Image (cartoon, rainbow, N blue to C red):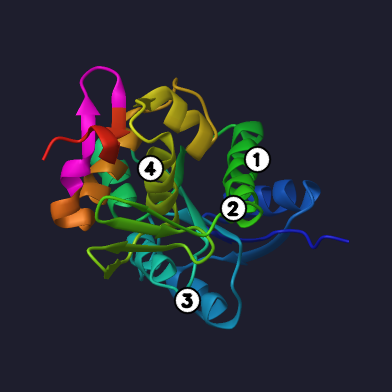
């Protein structure tokens, strides 16, 4: 029997924490809870959840500091969905810059939150069940089995979402991938949500690829594509 996914909910408002714990347990998840950043760190030192629901506004150690710690974990780190009452775009973008996989704004729809949690967990299942070994395109080598990326032979550290984004664009091999398609297939929700999610991850990916970023091109008003070596002009 497959084990239920383990979720860590980090939320300092007790009523919201209780609601989330009950909701997620009812949906069949194993739920761990923390009311502050320090307590979350203690739990993360002892166990490795599959996904973290993380409030940004925490007493003491901030949600962004917890996010940094989670994404610095060895191997493929847990997925992170931010819970935030903040409406400023800069907060969401900063979260994505630090490796967050999604966000939910308070007050949230319980049904939507559960769908987003399942969507993130499903992305991991699909990846783990579909190994394809090393692939090379130009100066970039991708190993799906080990979630490894090398550029000109040098290891490049990517978050899980950045890795999946790069792998998707490389598989398309010259075909344009629209923002809508990337949002649907990699993040698991439709184009009604903020399309800048894709743009933010593309910026981070280009920065990490360094000189090889020139292989990743923007098709204005449509989306992105990775150049096919057979048609690339040197």
Q: Is residue 17 magenta?
A: no
Compare residues 46 and 105 and report the one nearer the observer. Answer: 46
Mark 1 or 2: in front is 2
Q: CA distance from mark 3 to mark 1?
A: 24 Å
Question: From the viewer's perspective, is residue 81 above or below residue 133?
Answer: above
The segment highlighted magenta reads 213-223
Q: Residue at x 38, y 55 (%)?
A: 57
Q: Residue at x 14, y 35 (%)?
A: 233
Q: Which mark is residue 170?
A: 4
Q: CA distance from mark 3 to mark 4?
A: 36 Å
Q: Which residue is mark 1?
A: 114
Category of crowding for the residue at label 4, using alpha-carbon neighbours closer than 10 angstroms: few (below 14), some (14–19), many (at least 20): many
Q: Which residue is mark 3?
A: 41
Q: Residue at x 34, y 35 (%)?
A: 198
Q: Which residue is mark 2?
A: 124
Compare residues 205 and 234 and report the one nearer the observer. Answer: 234
Q: CA distance from mark 1 to mark 2?
A: 16 Å
Q: Tell me if I can see residue 87 in this picture.
A: no
Question: From the viewer's perspective, is residue 150 above or below residue 191?
Answer: below
Question: Which quadrant would residue 132 be assigned to in this image?
Answer: bottom right
Chain-order first, disc 3 or disc 1: 3
């Amino acid at each position: 029997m497959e084990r239920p996914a383990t979720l860590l909910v980090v939320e300092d408002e007790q009523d919201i924490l209780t609601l989330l714990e009950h909701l997620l347990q009812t949906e069949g998840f194993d739920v761990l809870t923390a009311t502050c950043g320090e307590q979350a760190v203690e739990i993360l030192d002892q166990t490795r959840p599959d996904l973290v629901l993380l409030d940004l506004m925490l007493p003491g150690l901030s949600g962004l500091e917890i996010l940094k710690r989670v994404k610095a974990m060895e191997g493929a780190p847990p997925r992170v969905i931010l819970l935030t009452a903040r409406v400023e775009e800069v907060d969401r973008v900063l979260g994505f810059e630090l490796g967050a996989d999604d966000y939910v704004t308070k007050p949230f729809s319980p049904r939507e939150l559960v769908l987003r949690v399942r969507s993130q967990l499903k992305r991991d299942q699909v990846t783990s069940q579909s190994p394809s070994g090393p692939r090379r395109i130009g100066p970039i080598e991708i190993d799906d089995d080990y979630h490894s990326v090398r550029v000109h032979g040098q290891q490049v550290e990517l978050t899980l979402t950045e890795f999946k984004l790069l792998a998707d664009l490389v598989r398309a091999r010259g075909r344009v991938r629209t923002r809508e398609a990337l949002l649907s297939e990699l993040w698991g929700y439709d184009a009604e949500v903020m399309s800048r999610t894709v743009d933010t991850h593309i910026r981070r990916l280009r920065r990490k690829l360094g000189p090889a970023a020139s292989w990743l091109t923007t098709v204005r008003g449509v989306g992105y594509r990775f150049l096919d070596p057979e048609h690339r002009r040197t």
